[in-house]
Image (cartoon, helix red, strand yellow):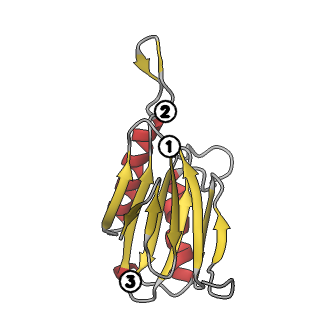
């Protein structure tokens, strides 16, 4: 592949989201954070978010660092690009519990709570989850190709 054939690349930072009608390779690194990848199977358009905490509590800015805001904003961005909700599928990644324990009790279990929130939001919007790689106690890197919906996880695991 020469450089002209290489897709555009975008690194997604925590608390952000990205979607585009052009072919992009979106990458991010997840620990307890979760990324929801949405892909329109007809328009062949994809996008991803990267949220850190499950719920915005109503204080401060309603940013995509919170799962309930991040999923809604990603869905709205996809719709603004011409996607249709009935053609969307989701893939969910991350949610590791890597914080260890404190006095024998797990601290917050943020990873689990982030995964639960992602599932609840996708169920609320009736978007089917086609694949997921969540939980555990280790982080993962993911790379999504927006024109195909294929996501590479960790060390070579492909979710098609």
According to the image, label 3 marks what residue? 41
- Mark 3 or mark 2, which is nearer the start of the sequence? 3
Check disc 3 and report its element: helix, strand or loop. loop
Residue 22 placed where, x, y %? Answer: 60, 85
Q: Residue at x 60, y 51 (%)?
A: 65
Check disc 1 and report its element: helix, strand or loop. loop
Other residues around mark 3 within 10 Å, as few (<14) / some (14–19) / many (≥20): some
Q: Is 133 or 111 nearer to us in this picture?
A: 133
According to the image, label 2 marks what residue? 98
Other residues around mark 1 within 10 Å, as few (<14) / some (14–19) / many (≥20): some
Label 1 near label 2: C-beta < 8 Å?
yes
Numbered badge on residue 139: 1
Q: Residue at x 39, y 89 (%)?
A: 42
Which quadrant, please, contains the C terminus? bottom left
Q: Nearer the viewer, mark 2 or mark 3?
A: 2
Q: Nearer the viewer, mark 1 or mark 3?
A: 1
Q: Image check: 14 left or right of 133? A: right
């Amino acid at each position: 592949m020469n450089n002209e054939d290489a897709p555009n690349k975008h690194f997604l930072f925590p608390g952000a989201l990205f979607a585009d009608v052009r072919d992009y390779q979106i990458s991010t690194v997840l620990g307890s954070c979760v990324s929801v990848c949405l892909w329109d199977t007809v328009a062949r358009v994809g996008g991803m978010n990267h949220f850190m905490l499950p719920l915005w509590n109503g204080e401060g800015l309603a940013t995509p660092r919170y799962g309930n805001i991040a999923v809604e904003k990603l869905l709205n961005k996809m719709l603004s690009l011409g996607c249709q909700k009935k053609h969307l599928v989701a893939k969910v990644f991350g949610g590791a519990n890597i914080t260890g324990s404190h006095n024998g009790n797990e601290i917050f279990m943020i990873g689990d709570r982030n995964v639960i929130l992602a599932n609840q939001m996708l169920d609320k919007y009736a978007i089917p989850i086609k694949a997921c790689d969540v939980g555990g106690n280790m982080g993962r890197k993911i790379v999504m190709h927006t024109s195909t919906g294929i996501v590479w996880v960790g060390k070579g695991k492909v979710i098609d």
